Image: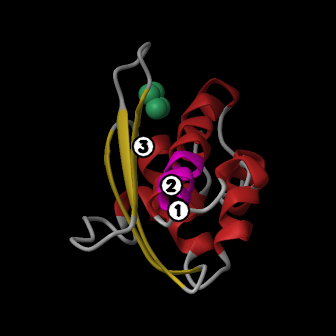
Amino acid sequence: MLYSQETMDHFLNPRNVGSIPDANGVAEVGNTTCGDVMRIYLKVEDDVVQDAKFETFGCASAIATSSMTTELIKGKPVTDALKLTNKEVVNKLGGLPANKLHCSVLAEEVLKAAVADYYQRSGADVLSTEL
Ligand code: FES
């Protein structure tokens, strides 16, 4: 099968779809080649990701990686969210076809951008973080 069971599950039953009205970390990233777009919303309190949601207009892999990404960062320190790599997300999904790995890169990019947005809004010294 092209996609793992886990990937199919997160594609067909994506977790954390939607927006967070009072999010304090938001970002949107698009892939100019395929035209897919991901937006992620973070609600961070005391430097812990209390909630994370996403809106993805894209392929099955983009939706599955967005879903898994939000699941992996909820309840975690924002510094952990910053360190989450697309490889970890892909591993949790049980792998992706090689020609779909770029979709997971989009999820990592949008997450890092949302954390950067959080740091900027909170007035943190972004340069001293591991961006
Ligand atoms: Fe565009 Fe998957 S094909 S993100």
Of tags 2 and 3, which is closer to the observer?
Answer: 2
Q: Residue at x 39, y 36 (%)?
A: 59
Q: Is residue 34 left or right of residue 65?
A: left
Q: Residue at x 21, y 71 (%)?
A: 21
Which numbered circle lies on residue 60?
3
Mark 3 residue's CB less than 8 Å from ligand 1: yes
Q: Residue at x 70, y 28 (%)?
A: 98
Identify the mark at residue 123; answer none if there is no mark.
1
Q: Which residue is mark 2?
A: 120
Q: CA distance from mark 2 to mark 3?
A: 31 Å
Badge 3 density bin: few <14, some 14–19, many ≥20, Cα 10 Å: some
**Total number of numbered labels?**
3
Question: Label 2 vs label 1: CA separation?
Answer: 5 Å
**Which residue is at the front of the view, 98 or 25?**
25
Q: Secondary structure at mark 3?
A: helix
In magenta, the rendered stretch is 111-120
Do the numbered discs 2 and 1 sit on residues whose CB atoms are within 8 Å? yes
Magenta-span inclusion, residue 119: yes
Q: Note whether 37 is above or below 20 in the view shown.
A: above
Depth order, front residue of 73/99: 73
SS under mark 2: helix
Picture coordinates of residue 47 (x, y %)?
60, 79
23 sits to left or right of 72: left
Label 1 neighbour load within 10 Å: few <14, some 14-19, many 20+: few
Residue 4 lies in magenta, yes or no?
no
Q: Based on the displayed image, in which of its 4 quarters is residue 100 positioned?
A: top right
Circles 3, 1 touching at the beta carbon (< 8 Å): no
